[in-house]
Image (cartoon, helix red, strand yellow):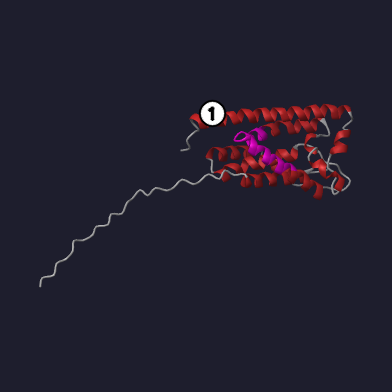
Amino acid sequence: MTELPRGSEAEALLAEARKALWVMVGFLAVIWVVQIINWLDHYQLSYDFGVRPREVGSLPEIFSSPFLHFSWSHIEGNSGPLFIFGFLAAYRGVKKFFAVTLLIIIASGLGAWFTAGAHTVGAGASGGLFGYFGYIIVRGLFDRRPIDIVIGLVMALCFAYSFSLLIPAGEGIGWQAHLFGFIAGVLGGWIFRDRRPRKAVTPTDQTTVITPPPTQDAS
C-alpha cells in the first residue's frame, strides 16, 4: 500500500499545488485577455504572430502562437482541458513544470513549422494541452509513484477521445502541433523524472554457517 505524504513532505506538496493553481489561473487570464484584444483586432494578432510553416522569419512565433486563438470556440475548447492537465502537470513542482512547458512549446512549434501545410498559419494552446496530457500519463511510470500512475490512467480514460486528434482530423485542425506536443510531453516525463535512489533490499533470511569441531587423530 502506498503511504500518503505526511508532515513536512505533505506541506511542501500542498505549497506546490497552490503555486500550480495560481500559475494556471494566471496563464488562462493572460490568454483570455489576449483573446479579447485579438478579437477586437479581427484576429490579426493570430495571423501576425502565428506559426507559418517553413518560413524562417516565423520561427520566433513558436513562442507567441500558444497564447493566440482564432475564435471564441477555439479558446473555449482549449481552456478547460488546459487548466486540468496543466495543474496536474505542475502540482509536484512548478520549476520542473516550466522546464517541461518550454520543451513542449519548442517541440510542438517546430513540429508544426516543419510539417504543417504550406500557406497556413498555426496558433492555439492545444499543442501545450496535448503535451501536458502526454506528460501526466507517463510521469507516474517514470517517477515510480503509484498515485501519479492512477492519475495518468484516469486522465487517459476520461479524455480518450483526445487521442483521435493526434492524427489528421480534418481541415483547419493543427494536428501536427498536437502530435509533436504529445510526444514532447512523454519525452519530458522521462527527461525530468525523479531520480530517487531505489530502496535497498534487506535480506529476510540469514544463512547460519556451522563450523564442525576439529577431528582428532589417534596416534
Which amino acid does the dot numbered 1 rest on?
Glu
Q: Nearer the viewer, residue 214 or 3?
A: 214
Outermost front residue: 219
Q: Where is residue 74 drawn, in percent x and y?
A: 79, 33
| Relative side of 122 to 1, left or right | right
Q: Residue at x 21, y 61 (%)?
A: 212
Q: Which residues are magenta?
A: 84-105
Residue 172's place in the image compared with 43, above or below, is below
Q: Is residue 60 magenta?
A: no
Q: Residue at x 44, y 47 (%)?
A: 200
- Looking at the image, can residue 173 be seen? no
Q: Residue under circle 1? A: 11
Q: Where is residue 110 drawn, in percent x and y?
A: 78, 47
Q: Quadrant of residue 91?
A: top right
Q: Nearer the viewer, residue 207 or 84?
A: 207
Classify mark 1: residues with Cα within 10 Å, few (<14), some (14-19) or many (20+): few
Q: Residue at x 88, y 37 (%)?
A: 48
Quadrant including the C terminus? bottom left
| Relative side of 44 to 198, left or right | right
Residue 142's place in the image compared with 124, above or below, is below
- Looking at the image, can residue 71 be seen? yes
Outermost bottom residue: 219
Outermost left residue: 219
Q: Where is residue 87 drawn, in percent x and y?
A: 65, 32
Q: Secondary structure at mark 1?
A: helix
Q: Nearer the viewer, residue 204 or 115?
A: 204
Q: Where is residue 40 drawn, in percent x and y?
A: 88, 26
Determine the main secondary structure of the stretch shown in magenta.
helix
Q: Residue at x 32, y 51 (%)?
A: 206
Q: How many marks?
A: 1
